Amino acid sequence: MGQFLEYVKMALDNIRSNKGRSFLTMLGIIIGITSVVTIVSIGNGLKKDVVDASNEQNNTISIQSNTEEVSDPNCITGDDISFLKTSLGDSVQSVSSYSATLGSISTRKGKFDTYVGLTTPDYENAQYQSPLVKGKYFNDNDVANANMVCVIDELTAIYLFGNTDVIGMSIELQVDSSIQDVLIIGIRETSAEMMEAEKQYLAMGMDKSINLEMPYTVSNSLGTPVEAFPSVSITAYDKDQASRIAKSAIQILNSRHQNLGESPFIQQKPMDFSDMFGSIMDGVTAFVALVAGISLIVGGIGVMNIMLVSVTERTREIGIRKALGAKTGSIIAQFLCESAIISGMGGIIGILLGAALTALITALGIGGIKAQLSFPAILVATIFSCSVGIVFGIYPARKAARLSPIEALRRM
């Protein structure tokens, strides 16, 4: 132990006597470790954001029929949806289905292509739907009477009429050969981000996307009848209850459609987005960190070069030590200790800089990223930086140990 401490002391003395050269030797290691720690931290932050956002979808259940033919008796009807809403009670936020068709609307400003969403009243409360800022959503009475009413978003109102005071105004909707006057009864909120994005699209000459939400029963008047839906979306208040609610919904649908002994209704299980995105982010982060880690190899080569120079400069010292009986192993240990300390110090500085950059990125909110420091990455970076010093210090150390004491003293 005492001999090892002596090697450490000699290494530190030599590093201190060549501060500038030692720092330049560490620079490659510092840059490499800083890059790896920062990149992994950013990757962890992005992964957490994506996974958290994806996990929010866990309280939305989709029950799928085994057919997409709406004429099939196992498709989900409006009565099924109403019954599900009543049966599931307070455990669910919404039970809705959605179909769509293309058409065009005409106002005094002109004629515009539009996307007509034919849906159920509970679609107002479906997850990720913006709240109403004016008017009201259509109700069961509007569905029962197939009232020609619609809900639009704020930006559509501004785009078509110049303001959002449009409740009670009518637009002319054409779907295929059917032309109907549609009354605007509600305005959905448009987020500031969406508003800005749409404005940029319009500034580039792109057309505004027009979306209407209408009772699905008006589809008969539009010439595109929607008698049933291939699926129903259920938003639970508590995502922990989602699985139980899905089983209950399937049992209810099977019972209503008299499917005894068979189950044409299944819970549609999209890919686990949190796992999928998490795996993608892990792969991307690992690849980018690997590319950044190449600089560690470059830094290791720098360590080897400097240690080779050090061997040449210290030929006299090596010769005297060997003449006085120093063993080959002790010479190798001395030089390996020095290269490992240089790399280790560079690694520590790199880790501190990486942590500082991570904190700075999070504090400034650059790109909305909340970087998350990875302690496994720090551990790996520490081990790797020391390993670089040892691996790339072996050749110079062996070269020093192989010097003949007579030859070394002759060069004095």
Image (spheres, grey):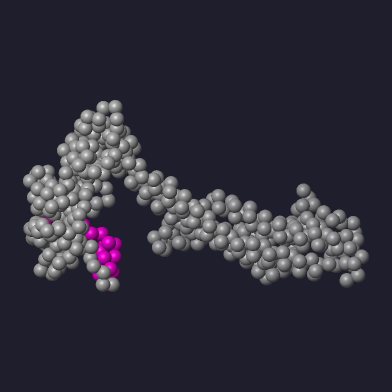
In the picture, measured across the screen, residue 89 lies left or right of residue 246, that is left
Residue in the picture at 26% in, 35% down: 249
Residue 260 at x, y percent in the picture: 26, 27
As displayed, is residue 188 above or below residue 199?
A: above
Tell me where residue 408 sits by quadrant: bottom right
As displayed, is residue 258 above or below residue 160?
A: above
Q: Nearer the viewer, residue 367 or 354?
A: 367
Would you say residue 396 is visible in this rendering? Answer: yes
Residue in the picture at 63% in, 53% down: 383
Tell me where residue 20 sits by quadrant: bottom right
- Magenta span contains residue 188: yes
Residue 109 at x, y percent in the picture: 13, 69
In the picture, measured across the screen, residue 87 lies left or right of residue 264, that is left
- Magenta span contains residue 30: no
Task: Give the magenta part as a residue range.
Answer: 184-203
Residue 212 at x, y percent in the picture: 17, 56
Magenta stretch secondary structure, dominant: helix
